[in-house]
Image: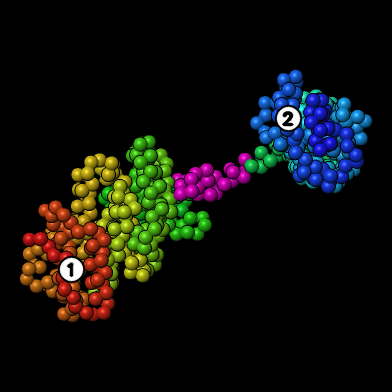
Amino acid sequence: MAKNLILFKILITISIAIPIPTASPATVVEDLNNLLPPPDFNATITNNCRRNPSLRYCNSSAPLLLIFKSTIVAAHLCNLSNNPNCVESFPKIDLRARPRLAPLYLSFDFFWRFCPLSIQSVDLSNNSLIGSFPEDVLGCAQIRSLDLSLNRLSGEFPVEKVSSSLPNLTSLNLSYNGFSECRVSEVQFFSRFNSSGFVNSGVIPDHRELRIRTVAFLVGFPVAVVAAVLFFMWLCFWRENCGRGEFEFEARAVEEAIGGLLRRDLAGKSDSDLGRVYRGVLRDGRVVGVGVVYSEEKAAAREVRRKFVERCGVIVRLRHRNVVRVLGWCDSRRFVAVVMEWIDGGGGGRRRNLGAWIRDCVPPWKQRVQAIAGIAGAVRYLSGECPQIGYSLRAGDVVVSKNGDPVITRFEFDDDDDDDGDDSDGDRSCAKRMCEFGVLVFEILMNRWDLGRRERESGIVEWVKVNCAGNVEDLIDERVERTAEMVVEAAEMVELGLICVDLSRRRRPSWEKFRQVLLTISRHAHRGGGHGHVLHRQH
């Protein structure tokens, strides 16, 4: 009760401290746990704030109990700091060389929040304190001296916070700590204090070391810049995509890879936009196919090149077994080209299209069905991943790998293939693609490669319509070994092709449906079993 009365009385003073006998950490903790504010504590706080509004607990929303506890800590701390008359004044906090007490009093954040206004100096030196700068000390905004020397404090010293929170600070000692080196812009702050307060503190760079660093920077920076410029010049000369995106190739690198677009490297011809495909070898040893999309006249148009790059950004991310992997593109004023993986047809590095594969290799029935199913799966994939990109399903543009897998290799980039128009344009594009697929089915089943391409494509559909009503067996390539089950399957394949080329149909089966039918036929072809029709044509 006596301590309560003394604390109650001392609240009227500025120091907010009381004289008590020599304190120990246990005494502080006990008092914080046991002492309670006197009954008229609230009224005393109100009167104090009326007389001196600058007191830190004034206008505070903190609980009264917390304010009372701060007076308990202040009373003990004033006594421990050997102040001569704690009832009248509390001028200093002196906890130097008290490694057990200093951390304890630093942990009382509520005390530092209501730090008595009479305190002018804080000494926490030689306590082996660890961690970052104790920012709670900044609550004593009026102090003139702060000593944190001979500790193990580390991290960045908060120059801006100390400068703004302690405007009256005239003495600062950070010696023998491990602070991080300050920025050049912050050196001016430390010039306000005696330099002896920063010996081995880490915050101020050593002047000799600073001169060495400055000389090294002035000499090394220009050398580094010149070396970097030379290095990037070397990259631009030797690497295919220097200074470009992940998938872009330089025109010089592409021309070098294919020997300057020589005729002897020509791999295939077409009269559409992807007109010429060349076999080439990049500097890293990769064998590639380079499809020239636009020549110099059209490649110079900025809008054409913009749309080209936009579409290439889509197709380079396609991944399907029956779609060629596009490695990137070349976008220059001289020519625009697609760089893709080279598909070896097993003939000395030469490509083999689907027509040549049927004509020269005479694949068995099972492989033909699997080829049609593979292309249907690729179309289903492309329809979902990039419906806005056109591609060719003509037998001359589908390449067969040495493993017998058909691969779609020709993408279309002309403006009239863009699906940015209305729904009718998309429907026409879908119908065109399905019609091409139907023709491809007939070409794989039959052997009509003795005819020219235009004659073959224009006449094959009518020829199938006329002859399929008679004997389907007559439509099958005569070089393929026939079985009764195979003829049944061929009839279903012909029915499938006729559905695709029937332009009068308003509703067509989905590509997924086609793929499932073809997979069913393929499995039966593998087992040699028969089955019933799965799709039926509308008459």
The residue segment tinted magenta is 229-251
Tell me if residue 183 can be seen: no
Circle nearer the viewer, 1 or 2: 2
Q: Secondary structure at mark 1?
A: loop
Residue 41 visible in the picture: yes
Asked which quadrant contains residue 32, the reply is: top right
Mark 2, Cα crowd under 10 Å, few <14 / some 14-19 / many 20+, is: few
Q: Seen in the image, is 39 located left or right of residue 24?
A: left
x and y, in percent, of residue 520 in the image: 24, 71
Label ID, residue 534? 1
Residue in the image at 81% along x and 28% along y: 9
Q: Amino acid at mark 2?
A: Asp
Q: Nearer the viewer, residue 292 or 473?
A: 473
Give me the C-alpha separation between circle 1 and circle 2.
96 Å
Amino acid type at image mark 1: Val
Find out whether the residues at labels 1 and 2 contact each other: C-beta distance under 8 Å: no
